[in-house]
Image (cartoon, rainbow, N blue to C red):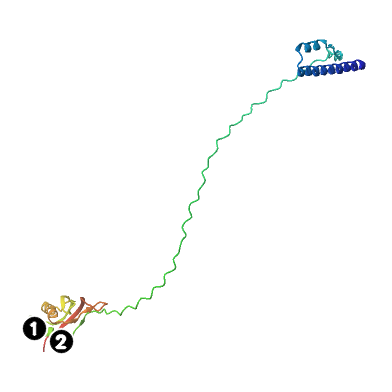
Amino acid sequence: MAYADQQMSGNRVIAIIIVALIHIALGYLLITGLAVDAVKNVVERVTTIDVEEPPPPEPEDEPPPPPEDVPQTVPPPVAPPPPINIARTPPPVRTTPTIPPPAPPALRIPPPAPPAPPAPPAPPSQARGASPDNLNRWAARIQGDYPSSALRREEQGTVTMRITIGANGRVEACSVTGSSGSSALDDAACRGMQRYARYNPALNAAGNPISDTTTQSIRYVLPD
């Protein structure tokens, strides 16, 4: 077997050398311009060498068949895996950024105002009520104007009156609040007050004369 391989290798080397020489000769003939016929003659003279191929390898022994008594086990059926529910990707949630509210303006507290100067003291009030002016003089005149009818009937007594005194100090109104018992004397007293009586007028806080109301009594006494 080894000898055959060596012989086959030698034949291959010889064949390769011959083929190389032929190619060199062909190239030379082509270069020197020889006729194509000469090339054909040289090619025909080349001895063809058959290269024997090695015999095919012997087939290996086949494994013995399995015994018939052994029962063939059938694999159990395999259940297909349960379907996997692949949920779709939910749509992206668009979130709106929360913009914080603007900061409140800074609270500027003004400085406290300076204390107000103290108010000047109020002037003293000049308010006063009406008062008789020279009471004895005009009271005597009223008493001296004694009604003749009362004298004949010998009537006497005290008359009490409510009078209104104007800003000029004179009696503007008169009403009897306490009778003397004689209508003649009551009437004569109011007439005399409006005719003869004089008063210092009442004043307000500023000192201006104003109207005022007061009471006055006149006593009538029969002459001796």
Task: Tell me the kind of residue under disc 2.
Answer: Arg
State the CA–CA distance, disc 1 to disc 2: 22 Å
Q: Residue furthest right?
A: 3
Label 1 crowd bin: few (<14), some (14–19), many (20+), radius 10 Å: some
Q: Quadrant of residue 148?
A: bottom left
Mark sitting on residue 73: none
Disc 1, SS: helix
Of 213 and 178, the residue lying toward us: 213
Q: Which callout, 1 or 2, points at the residue further toward the start of the chain? A: 2
Front tag of 1 and 2: 2
Give the quarter of the figure containing the N terminus: top right
Q: Is residue 95 above or below residue 143?
A: above
Q: Is residue 136 left or right of residue 69?
A: left
The spot of residue 145 in percent (x, y) is 10, 83
Q: Percent x, y for residue 146?
A: 10, 83
Q: Quadrant of residue 215?
A: bottom left
Q: Residue 82 placed where, x, y %?
A: 65, 26
Q: State the residue lying farthest toward the bottom.
A: 224
User: Along the line of sight, which residue is nearer the eye, 147 or 135?
Assistant: 135
Tag of residue 151 = 1
Query: Could you tell whether 124 is left or right of 223 in the image?
Result: right
Amino acid tagged 1: Leu
What residue is drawn where x is 77% and y is 10%? 37
Is residue 3 or residue 30 the one in the foreground?
A: 30
Residue 101, position in %: x, y?
Answer: 48, 51
Residue ID for mark 2: 137
> Eyeballing the image, is 22 above or below 97?
above
Question: Secondary structure beneath disc 2?
Answer: helix
Q: Residues within 10 Å of mark 2 (few under 14, many from 20)?
A: few
